[in-house]
Amino acid sequence: MKIRRLGLISRIALLVVCVEAVAFSMLGWFYTDRFSTAIEERTYSHLHLVGRMIANDELAISSISRQSVMTDLVGAPYLEGMVIGGNGRVIVSTNPAYLGSPARDIPGFDARWFADSAPDEKFIRGDNTLRAVMHIRGAAGGAPMYTTVIMISTSELDAMKRSIILRGQLGSLVFILLSSALIVLIAQHLITRRVNVSLEVLKKAEEGALDARIPVTSDDELGQLQHGINSMTAKVGTLLNQHRRNAEELREQKDLLASVIQHAPIRVFWKDRESRYIGCNSQFAQDAGLSGPEELVGKTDYDMGWRDQAEFYRADDRAVMESGISTLDFEETQTTPDGRTIWLSTSKVPLRGGDNRIIGVLGIYTDITNRKQAEEQIHNLAYFDPLTGLPNRTLLLDRLKHAMTAGIRHRVFGAVLLIDLDNFKTLNDTLGHDVGDQLLRQVAQRLTQVVREGDTVARLGGDEFVVILEGLGESAPEAAEKAGLVGEKILAAVNQPYQFGTHAHHSSPSIGVVLFDGNRHTMDDLLKQVDIAMYQAKKDGRNALRFFDPQMQESINVRMELESELHMALESGQLDLHYQAQVDNSGRPLGAEALIRWNHPERGLVSPAEFIPLAEETGLILSIGQWVLEAACSRIKAWESAEHTRGLVLSINVSAKQLHQADFVDQVRAAVQRHDIKPALLKLELTEGMLLENVEGTIATMNALNAIGVRISLDDFGTGYSSLQYLKRLPLDQLKIDRSFVRDIATDSSDKAIVTTIIVMARSLNLDVIAEGVETEEQRQFLFHAGCDHFQGYLFSRPVPIGQFESLLDQSRQSAPADI
């Protein structure tokens, strides 16, 4: 029988028997060894006792008495003792036969007893005996007076040992058997009964009675085991109850999930492998314009009318189902029925059946508009200045990098302008940082309004702003001129007063400019150079613009000097009007066009082509236009006082900036009333280009001017992009054929066709027609025969000062009309 087949009690009993057997074996060996040692100690004790008695003459009695004492002193059957006198004969012995006999005749005599070199006490071993010898000497020493010998029989001693061992083994065996039986009985009571109780509880637990518990009566190991079983069954019961609750909760959650999906504000749908809808939630159905989810079942994206996106959706579905890989967070925009643009995140996952086979696709649309708005806010914080809303240094460098790359690609120049506000620290120190912040915000607005839509305005930090201008031209001079114009606009805009509550503040900028084409500069180079140019502007007195390139700076200086002189010309009366006659088909003057001239005290007559564009760009054209209007009304009034000039119509050119002023109509009305002239004698010439800017607003302004009574002529007709659709709505009195069509009219068939068409169209609209740039009789003849009644050009008169013009009028009045 194998040990592992034994029961627990049997194993314990066997273990106890083994342990006790080993223990009693060791104990027997120990006591046997102790017995031998005790015999030797007893022998020595008797030896010493006999020796002391002899030494004290206590044995000086008869041999019989001595024999009796010796026997009593030895006192053990396995010991023999004798006393040998100094003459070598036995004087005392436990064996009477040895008395009086020479010691050497005694059996077992050993000469070593009397060896001189031997110690007074010694053990001498023989074949079957062990002898203890002791010499007793006199007070003066010398030879032994007596020799005491005690002999031990080893055979008898061994027999005694065997007897002791046998009795010990028998006793041990009895003890082992009795103790084992007792242990088995105790174990039966303490272990088996408790184990059986535990097994019964486990069986009940197996049958489902997890509330059954083992009565624990002890804290021993078995009690701890029972505690563990109770704890285990309790935990199993808890887990089972939890599992049941979880199953119930799972069913509830499943129902809740179905309800949530149906009523969630996100769009959820699922399709089969053919991309046919097999279900959706209420939100999806509602957004799709369906009465309910059931209406979608069986339809495809094509059936739903989403043809523009249906193929993409189908391909996306197929990719998800074939790869088994989800597509997550595909973002797209969608316009809601109320016109809002929202962001949607689309996620699709494979829809799997019970066998894990892909049977379709599940899709979710989530409205991420709020997240996108938050991302935009984060982006703005990272790339935009929170105070002004302008790009910050990070975004500025990125855009400058792209601008330089574009310059290389397209071989065009760009420019960087660094604007620093003069005396900004003083404003902060005196009025506080709040006012300083207001100023920075207003400056940012003005800079943004001055530049083109595609240009970059950024805040570098503090009171420094940067403007990046792209696509300024293929040559450096052209780019420098355009950059300078923008810089002058910035100077003018920033110099306008600022209002902070009741406090008005004036600020000026110092502007540095550097050009780039992307080939010869790094971003660091550009920023260093423009910084140097800006500090040069500060060094030159502030409120100035300086180029990094000295040659370009010189051209800007000339332009700025011209602007300054133009201001002075307006104030000092250097501007003048020259008049060019407008005649009818008989050559009779009908009026004139007033053309502005600048009589510079040093440069002489400055061409309008040189200073009018400058006046347009700087805004000075408004002041010049107002001066021309007043001068024209004054001239009309003067002509009304003379017979030969009465009734002449005077035309003046109006710029786009003038026309688009909110109070332009009021300005014209006030001038007409102030000079008390007939409004019909004043004719305003407008170009086609200005009509294209805010067509409806321009038409409203022209109607208001027409209501005053002034006449309106459309100048340079045919050079723009006139549309008959709105041309017929304009309250015009006259069309003016541009000189570019008249110049080659005698030889160019295209010009002839264009001019003829313009005249026919004007007649159909009941408009007068006048041709400018008529310089030859051949041109006049063609125009006349084509139906043009009015002419203007060198053939009749050059633009001349008022004195010469009125002299020409006198000559024309005195001479007969030409026969045309």
Image: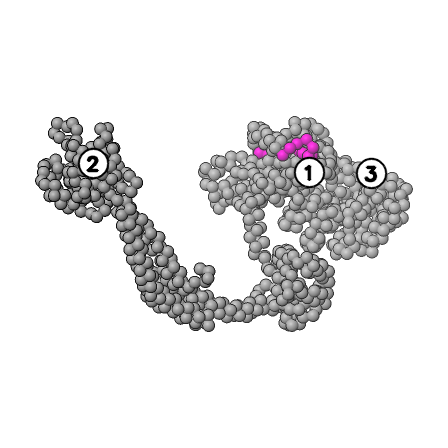
Query: Residue 348 or 692: which is nearer the viewer?
Result: 348
Picture residue at 69% right of the left edge, 54% below the top: 696
Q: Position of residue 639 (x, y in %)?
A: 73, 43
Q: Amino acid at mark 1?
A: Thr
**Dot in front, 2 or 3:** 2
Residue 429 seen in the figure: yes
Query: Residue 7 or 718: which is nearer the viewer?
Result: 7
Label annotation for residue 103: 2
Task: Give the magenta part as a residue range.
Answer: 507-523
SS assignment at label 2: helix
Picture residue at 48% right of the left edge, 43% below the top: 435
198 sits to left or right of 606: left
Image quadrant where residue 808 sits: top right
SS assignment at label 3: loop
Q: Is residue 509 magenta?
A: yes
Q: Amino acid at mark 2?
A: Ala
Image quadrant where residue 741 sits: top right
Q: Is residue 47 magenta?
A: no
Image quadrant where residue 96 sits: top left
631 sits to left or right of 773: left
The crowding category of the residue bearing disc 2, from other C-alpha atoms within 10 Å (few below 14, some 14 to 19, many at least 20), is many
Q: Is residue 791 above or below residue 700?
A: above
**Dot in front, 2 or 1:** 2
Picture residue at 11% right of the left edge, 39% below the top: 59
Q: Amino acid at mark 3?
A: Tyr
Q: Which residue is mark 3?
A: 794
Q: Earlier in the sequence, mark 2 or mark 1?
A: 2
